[in-house]
Amino acid sequence: MEIHRTERGADRINQLVESAAELFLEQGYDAVSIDMVISRSGGSRRNVYDHFGGKEGLFIEAVTRLCADLSAPLELLEIPQSGEFNRALSSFGCSVLGIVLQPQTLALHRLMASKGHQFPRLSQAIWFGGPENAARILAGWIEPKQADGQFRTDISAFDLAEQFLSMLVMAPQLRGLVGIDRQPLNKATIERLSEAAVKTFLQGAMTREAKDRG
């Protein structure tokens, strides 16, 4: 019976956090009250204060979980070292765009753009779990190509990775954030954007010798 009560309690707390995350993403931090969260999820004010200390603690927990949800699919991304550069990079680019342009991801970035100054650790968690993580994965793909003389070495692998991701993500992400693209981009559009970024990037990143061999 005690285990059953404990499981029920854990489920209640998880529901509180999930409902809070939904409300914060929908309405922003300032507009959400504890009573609104309880109304959506059930539970009680005592649950919130006992486990999170209040609204701020609940917000931190909710956004921390959202950050984990954002970084998890990036951790699973792999770029094959063999095969054509453009195909490998295009596939990676499509995967990244599919993650960063999700409505929930865009809503999280809007939320932290407005409250990041108040919660800098959360903003940094989004950065390290998202853009920094993607750049680290891509830099690991670039480094062997620099060692083989296929990519230029006067720019670090990490800087090259960040430049590719900036070309890939910046415009479509901004359009999504400000509401120009109100619906998620379709597969064909994502593929087109990725291929365009890859072509531009490879022109600047590959050595002349590698281009000649290609």
Image (spheres, rainbow, N blue to C red):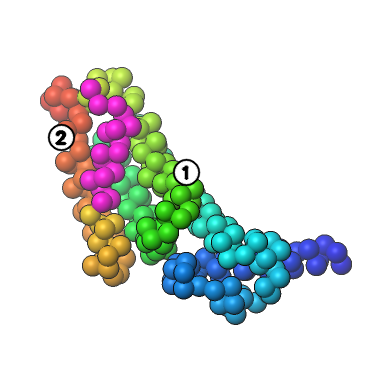
**Measuring 18% from the left and 47% from the top, which residue is drawn there?**
196
Tell me the kind of residue under disc 1. Glu
User: Residue 90: x, y in percent?
Assistant: 27, 45
Checking the image for residue 55, the label placed there is none
Tell me the kind of residue under disc 2. Gln
Q: Is residue 152 left or right of residue 111?
A: left
> Marks 2 and 1: CB-CB under 8 Å?
no
User: Residue 55: x, y in percent?
Assistant: 58, 66
Checking the image for residue 203, the label placed there is 2
Depth check: give the residue in front, 19 or 33. Answer: 33
**Measuring 28% from the left and 20% from the top, which residue is drawn there?**
148
Range of magenta residues: 154-170
Label 1's element? helix
Q: Is residue 1 above or below residue 79?
A: below
Position of the C terminus, as image quadrant, is: top left
Which residue bears the numbered disc 1? Answer: 75
Magenta run includes residue 149: no
Depth check: give the residue in front, 196 or 112. Answer: 112
Position of the N terminus, as image quadrant, is: bottom right
Q: Residue furthest bottom?
A: 39
Q: In this view, does 204 lie to the left or right of 98?
A: left
**Measuring 55% from the left and 68% from the top, which residue is drawn there?**
20
